[in-house]
Amino acid sequence: MEVAANSVIGKQRISNEDYVGYFKNQQGALIAILADGVGGSNGGEIAASTAVDFIGQAFQNHHISSIIDTKAWLSKTISDVNNKIVEMGIEDESLSKMATTVVVALFFGNQYLLTHLGDSRCYLLRSSQLKQLTVDHSYINFLIEKGEVKNGENIDFNLQNVIVKGLGVSSDADVDISNIQFRPGDQLLLCSDGLTKMVSDETISKILNMRLSGRQKVDRLIDTANDNGGKDNISAILIDDLG
């Protein structure tokens, strides 16, 4: 299994509020985590780095005994880091508006657990076909699901980055956790909206199908987002089974 990750500031931001990381426990199992922070001052950066480091470091000390136990551990860990981010905002007024998206993939054997909050995404490339595995927890998607706007309509720019679920958004961080088989040749992409708002799914699929290393694919995705405007921070983690 090959893992590649990168995070860049983009062309229009003055700081990078995305954060990525991947960690292994003592059994050699892997967890990949991507977060996209929001908030005044440097709150977004703090929220995102807190989320990734907290979950990753907890995983390094976690022993996988069963799927059920690990699902429960992941749910509790996300709840714990949500509480931590909320408490940090209460204790420091300058961090009171900070929050972050998070998308997590935890691999063991030939399967993985997947969960997320916010509009950072996970895509699966299988048999050359790209599929989005996550549903954006965004205000825009909320309006689309209610039928108040149609997908593809021009949306108020100020609403485009509003998330309805995330770490630090509320005291409740309940998550849905999926258990998915990881087949030979599969590629799993975790990415922030700085990538998906600049690069179409068609182009993402085209790049992932190229005969390149994982790192080259990640760099190609990020370069394409920058070439298309780079309006936000751009981050990606690619896990390739290599067949």
Image: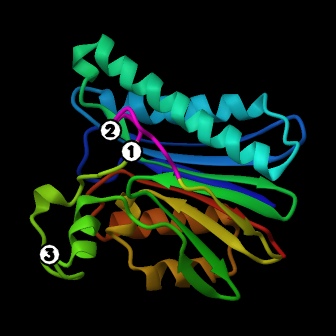
Measure the alpha-carbon separation of dots 2 and 3.
23 Å
Q: Position of residue 133 (x, y in %)?
A: 54, 71
Identify residue for label 2.
169
- The foreground one among 208 and 50 is 50
The three-letter amino acid code for the residue at tag 2 is Val
Q: Amino acid at mark 3?
A: Glu
Q: Quick check: 163 above or below 97?
A: below
Q: Residue at x 65, y 35 (%)?
A: 56
Considering only vertical position in the picture, is 190 above or below 125? above
Instruction: Identify residue for label 1.
Output: 166
Q: Which residue is mark 3?
A: 148
Which secondary structure class fits the magenta region best?
loop
192 on left or right of 144:
right
Contact flag, marks 1 and 2 (Cβ < 8 Å):
yes
Do the residues bearing badges 3 and 1 touch, measured as CB atoms within 8 Å?
Answer: no
**What are the residue bounds of the magenta stretch?**
167-175
Q: Secondary structure at mark 2?
A: loop
Residue at point 37%, 25% (across, down): 86
